[in-house]
Image (tube, grey):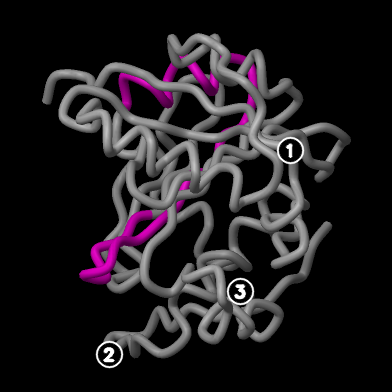
């Protein structure tokens, strides 16, 4: 069981990867990158070597104008709690905001998805076998919804969230990564993100 805290992810603030400005990360238990993409309705594309290869894909994707209708995500195989996990990463599009994608992705497994954009609009979601258990914005960790909104309170405090009546915002992104690690066992590092082999896929944006 991971006991990660926000101190373990202090590197994010100064990382050359730019995660403090924006990222979207989704972790799915016990499935391959190919299965991840199939579950969200995406065809497998050619591989991308490392995060720079994935960003090259993103640049071509945006240049094509497809971002008006589709979302891009790169999925890599990683190790976590219980063995294999699939890690979906994007810097400019977020599949995690759509129940239409996360519910089928989480069939029979756990899915943790979180992210933020350049305006600090952020989210954290925990799905279990097609059910949204907990959703909150890391900037406002006391305002939670879902079928079991208080289930993560102890882990949130351990990760570094302030759940008092006057929560502070310091280190909330690092605490978000720490909470995800506590629930998945996947330790996110600069090296992991930089060197993983990603399988990009595109999926049509669900109707809102």
Residue 178 in the image: above or below residue 193 = below
Task: Judge left or right: residue 187 versus residue 39.
Answer: right
Q: Position of residue 46 (x, y in %)?
A: 62, 20
State which region is magenta: 99-123
Q: Earlier in the sequence, mark 3 or mark 2?
A: 3
Closer to the camera in the image, 98 or 107 = 98
Residue that carries the numbered disc 1 in the rendered image: 197
Q: Which mark is residue 159?
A: 3
Residue at horizontal 50 percent and vertical 64 percent from the top: 153
Residue at 37% across, 71% down: 21
Is label 1 in contact with label 2 (beta carbons under 8 Å)? no
x then y, percent, for residue 184: 70, 47
First of labels 1, 3 by sequence position: 3
Numbered tag placed on residue 92 in the rendering: none
Residue 20: say if magenta: no
Label placed on residue 166: 2
Q: CA distance from mark 1 to mark 2?
A: 42 Å
> Do we see residue 112 in this rendering?
no
Task: First in sequence, mark 1 or 2: give its number.
Answer: 2
Q: Secondary structure at mark 3?
A: helix
The x and y percentages for residue 196 are 75, 45
């Amino acid at each position: 069981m991971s006991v990660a805290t926000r101190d373990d992810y202090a590197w994010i603030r100064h990382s050359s990867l730019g995660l403090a400005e924006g990222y979207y990360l989704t972790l799915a238990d016990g499935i391959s990158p190919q299965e991840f993409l199939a579950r969200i309705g995406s065809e497998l594309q050619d591989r991308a070597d490392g995060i720079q290869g994935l960003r090259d894909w993103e640049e071509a994707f945006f240049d094509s104008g497809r971002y008006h209708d589709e979302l891009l995500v790169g999925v890599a195989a990683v190790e976590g709690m219980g063995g294999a996990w699939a890690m979906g990463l994007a810097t400019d599009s977020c599949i995690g905001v759509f129940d239409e994608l996360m519910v089928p992705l989480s069939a029979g497994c756990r899915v943790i998805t979180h992210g933020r954009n350049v305006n600090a609009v952020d989210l954290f979601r925990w799905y279990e076998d097609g059910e949204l258990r907990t959703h909150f914005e890391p900037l406002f960790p006391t305002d939670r919804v879902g079928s079991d909104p208080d289930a993560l309170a102890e882990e949130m405090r351990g990760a570094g969230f302030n759940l008092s009546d006057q929560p502070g915002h310091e280190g909330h992104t690092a605490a978000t990564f720490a909470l995800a690690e506590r629930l998945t066992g996947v330790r996110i590092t600069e090296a992991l993100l930089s060197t993983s082999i990603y399988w990009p896929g595109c999926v049509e944006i669900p109707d809102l």
